């Protein structure tokens, strides 16, 4: 169990929460936290499929922010868990807009890490007029090179994890691990998809932090959501054109943004954060020298809270 960094705000419960049916198949869980008259902010979790944690509420001063959080399609408390059908980036963007309208919010700060940064950028580029600014962490642009690194680059850093991950499929399929895992994860045979989901989730989870952490008890909710939805989105290029998020950054580069990146992130390597910053001259890049990928690593958490505090005071990042 990782230790909570001291910079986070105290634990807080939602003011209200509920379920919203977004189509005939999917119903998403949402919650509202903090000051109902505060600065609106939407929190976008990672994965895809990782879902919310109570710690996600704690990056924001609850006296100053109206914090909207939700489990994306197929994740967390949303139903059906792990459902990949009717699940695309464009549909997630529609869900965000549906929530914004439901809460009567005109514009909001967009906060997202890892896959949440991907979705934040895609949402912002689709609806720049609805955004006040961006707090982004552990940048993932969903390019082919990043997907290849996620799957195969690990052998350079965690050869034992890579070997264990690859060993879950026959040798003749190990040249295309994404295809091999996707076939198993998205089938209807529980004897196929559960072992694959657990292997995928462990392969990612054991390299989130720079320093080893005490392993938590396995979570079937996390394993199935992450395994199925990450493989589904990666197999489809995030439902984006190659490098679309950098290509279209001009649609949002008039808005304030801070990019928080762990120097030793081996899930979403720093090159992506650097490329985004170069394409967005007005953005602020905070490279954390002693961190990996985890949002709750001390340096990353402090930088994220500092960003929300700056925006609270000034409406920009310094």
Image (tube, grey):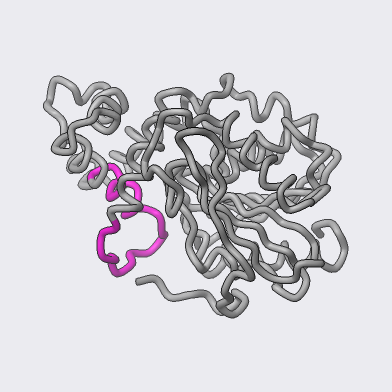
Q: Which residues are magenta?
A: 199-219
Residue visible at 52% across and 60% down in the picture: 295
Q: Is residue 209 left or right of residue 112?
A: left
User: Hey, which quadrant is residue 84 in on the image?
Assistant: top left
Residue visible at 37% across and 45% down in the picture: 81
How many callouts does the rendering have? 0
As drawn, 180 above or below 80:
above
Residue visible at 73% across and 64% down in the picture: 66
Residue 306, image x and y in percent? 70, 67
As drawn, 170 above or below 202:
above
Residue visible at 62% across and 76% down in the picture: 9
Residue 269 seen from this side: no
Q: Is residue 266 left or right of residue 195?
A: right
Residue situated in front as seen by the camera: 255 or 84: 84
Magenta stretch encompasses residue 302: no
Residue 124, image x and y in percent? 72, 38
Residue 258, image x and y in percent? 72, 52
Residue situated in front as seen by the camera: 19 or 170: 19
Residue 220 seen from this side: yes
């Amino acid at each position: 169990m990782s230790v909570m960094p001291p910079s986070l705000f105290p634990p807080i419960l939602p003011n209200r929460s509920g379920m919203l049916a977004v189509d005939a198949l999917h119903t998403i869980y949402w919650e509202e936290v903090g000051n109902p008259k505060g600065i609106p902010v939407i929190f976008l979790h990672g994965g895809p499929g990782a879902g919310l944690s109570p710690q996600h509420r704690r990056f924001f001063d609850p006296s100053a922010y109206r914090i909207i959080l939700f489990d994306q399609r197929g994740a967390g408390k949303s139903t059906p868990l792990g459902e990949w059908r009717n699940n695309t980036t464009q549909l997630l963007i529609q869900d965000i807009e549906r929530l914004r309208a439901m809460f009567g919010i005109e514009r909001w700060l967009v906060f997202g890490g890892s896959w949440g940064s991907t979705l934040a950028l895609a949402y912002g580029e689709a609806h720049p007029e609805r955004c006040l600014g961006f707090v982004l962490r552990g940048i993932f642009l969903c390019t082919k090179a990043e997907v290849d690194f996620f799957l195969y680059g690990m052998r350079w850093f965690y050869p034992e994890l890579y070997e264990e991950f690859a060993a879950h499929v026959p040798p003749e399929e190990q040249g295309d691990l994404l295809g091999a895992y996707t076939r198993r994860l998205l089938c209807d045979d529980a004897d196929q998809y559960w072992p694959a989901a657990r292997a995928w989730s462990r392969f990612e989870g054991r390299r989130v932090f720079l320093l080893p952490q005490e392993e938590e008890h396995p979570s079937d909710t996390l394993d199935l959501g992450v395994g199925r939805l990450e493989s589904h989105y990666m197999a489809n290029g995030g439902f984006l054109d190659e490098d679309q998020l950098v290509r279209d950054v001009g649609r949002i580069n008039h808005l304030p943004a801070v990019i928080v990146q762990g120097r030793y992130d081996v899930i979403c390597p720093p090159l992506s954060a650097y490329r985004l910053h170069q394409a967005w001259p007005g953005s602020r890049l905070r490279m954390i020298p002693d961190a990996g990928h985890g949002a709750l690593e001390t340096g990353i958490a402090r930088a994220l809270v500092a960003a929300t505090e700056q925006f609270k005071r000034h409406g920009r990042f310094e």
